[in-house]
Amino acid sequence: MFETSELNIKNQRVQRLYKLLFLMMTMLLILPVLLILGTLVVKGGSVISIDFLFTAPTDGMTAGGLFPALFGTVWLVAVALLISVPLGIAAAIYLSEYAGENWFTRIINLAIINLAGVPSIVHALFGVGAFVLFFGFGTSILAASLTLAIMTLPVVIVATRESLAAVPHAFREACWNMGATRWQTIRRVVLPNAVSGILTGVILEVSRTSGETAPIMFTGAVFFTPFLPQGIFDQTMAMSLHLFVVSTQVPGVPEDLPYGVALVLIAMVLLMNSISIGFRTWLRGKKKW
Amino acid sequence: MNTSSNAAIDNPMEFAIHTEKLNLWYGTFQALFDIDLDIKQGIITSLIGPSGCGKSTFLRSVNRINERLGYVRIDGSINVFDHNIYDPAVELVQVRKQIGMVFQRPNPLPISIRDNVLFGYNLHSEGKRASRSEQDGIAEDALRQVLLWDKVKDRLDSKATELSLEEQQKLCIARLLPVKPGLLLMDEPCSALDPKGTEAVEELIWELRGKYTILIVTHNMAQARRASEECIFMLMGKVVEHTATEDMFVTPRKQETADYIEGRYG
């Protein structure tokens, strides 16, 4: 009565086959990550040193370090975040906590989706037209960061909306029923519980922004400058553009130098990501409902 | 306990809630028909009736949380403490402050026990926030009223969401008290609790009688019988009977009431 039938065996075999297939697909996913990291460490690991991180390029960029680029990327990302984070969070709060479902919010949602879909080179050209030329910021950190900010805005908005939506509706109801206004509810209950998700979104954003090349190459990042930027109206070097330059534009660069630059860039991004994930785990552990 | 500014005691009038020809529609569906009710001040009144009879709808229109749905239309009037709460001049925040609401599922906020109790109080005293010791006194007083003080006094700073359901529900009642509401609405406050929790919360509700006017919706007839002084039986959006609880369960005047309390439908 309870013996295994032919059909059972056949079904089990098919089931194992599919499991194996899915497992292999998953392995395929992590393969590129391992390959990229492995190649970078093997080929570029030798150039990494304290000097490499904290000195400027020398000998026509064929030797020396990458400090101006590292410093410039920090500037670009910081200014971009200062612009996009407050703007994006405010917009997300409006959209998820105040706005109803109507034609106006539908248009805004459509605009956000489209903004996220615009290729980065188009953002770059828009940045040149709007910030460099029209507003007259010139090629500067400000123009480049504004371009990056506009590009990253949709991600901040989406991440914030998702974290706000993850706060159970019952908490809002509870507040409203005690006579709290929308803002009191947001300020005292919704935001404190959404902050981990928002911060995670922001930090992930940092990593994405730091790797962008196209939007900054016409708006504020330069090929080479021996000077560190003094303010937001200065031009600067940047990691991503520097990598592009030493890989393709300068003759006579030793083979391991671009790999070293790439390794620093990816290490920076991975560090940001790990901080973000660690932070999220820590904040999640703190909240219980 | 300081109840000197408690509306239930200050106001000399007899009725806490007075409705006239109250009709309510959800879109095109009419949920309440010509509700004329006078609910006495300072006692516990229970609302019973089968599912969908409109008892929760009525409760929710007394502090105007129904209208948040957007498609609710109301006709007639609801006077709470002699004020028509549907008057355009009425401030909704004051309605929510004076009329506290307790839900089926305890909904403490994910903050400390102490902050939960003081949440409403701090909302309504912005700008002139009480000192720490005053706040402690207020929290203690509210928690004592709900018979929770001895259990939680040593862990006021731990998360309210870590309490048991029964304690959470008591906390949800406690946090209404510091703003001194006159009227407490309870929508099946025990239905998420186990029998022991139910008993404890019922006991608490009984304890609060006199200090507050309490209107409680319940599915549990034994509860209505144990924990209320007057009882309203509703059926299909209409009030069938409204009498003293003991009379309703011993000598119901209407056939429908008798059928319901004997369990012939539910």
Image: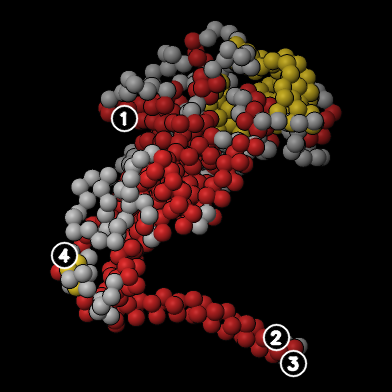
Crowd around label 2: few <14 · some 14–19 · many ≥20 (10 Å): few
Q: Say which chain tag 3 marks.
A: A
Residue most extreme to the bottom: A6
Q: Residue at x 21, y 76 (%)?
A: A47
Residue flagged by tag 3: what amino acid is it?
Glu
Q: Position of residue A101 (x, y in %)?
A: 63, 38
Q: Position of residue B234 (x, y in %)?
A: 75, 28
User: Disc 1 marks which residue?
Assistant: B136
Residue flagged by tag 1: what amino acid is it?
Asp
- In three-dimensional space, the C-alpha distance between marks 1 and 3, rounded to whole angstroms, equals 73 Å
User: Disc 3 marks which residue?
Assistant: A6
Q: Earlier in the sequence, mark 4 or mark 2?
A: 2
Q: How is the image coloured?
A: secondary structure
Residue B103 location, quadrant: top right
Label drawn at residue A11: 2
Q: Residue at x 78, y 19 (%)?
A: B34
Label drawn at residue B60: none
- In three-dimensional space, the C-alpha distance between marks 3 and 4, rounded to whole angstroms, equals 71 Å
- In three-dimensional space, the C-alpha distance between marks 1 and 4, rounded to whole angstroms, equals 58 Å
Q: Earlier in the sequence, mark 3 or mark 2?
A: 3
Q: Nearer the viewer, mark 3 or mark 4?
A: 4
Q: Nearer the viewer, mark 1 or mark 4?
A: 4
Q: Say if B2 sits above or below A121 in the image.
A: above
User: Disc 4 marks which residue?
Assistant: A55
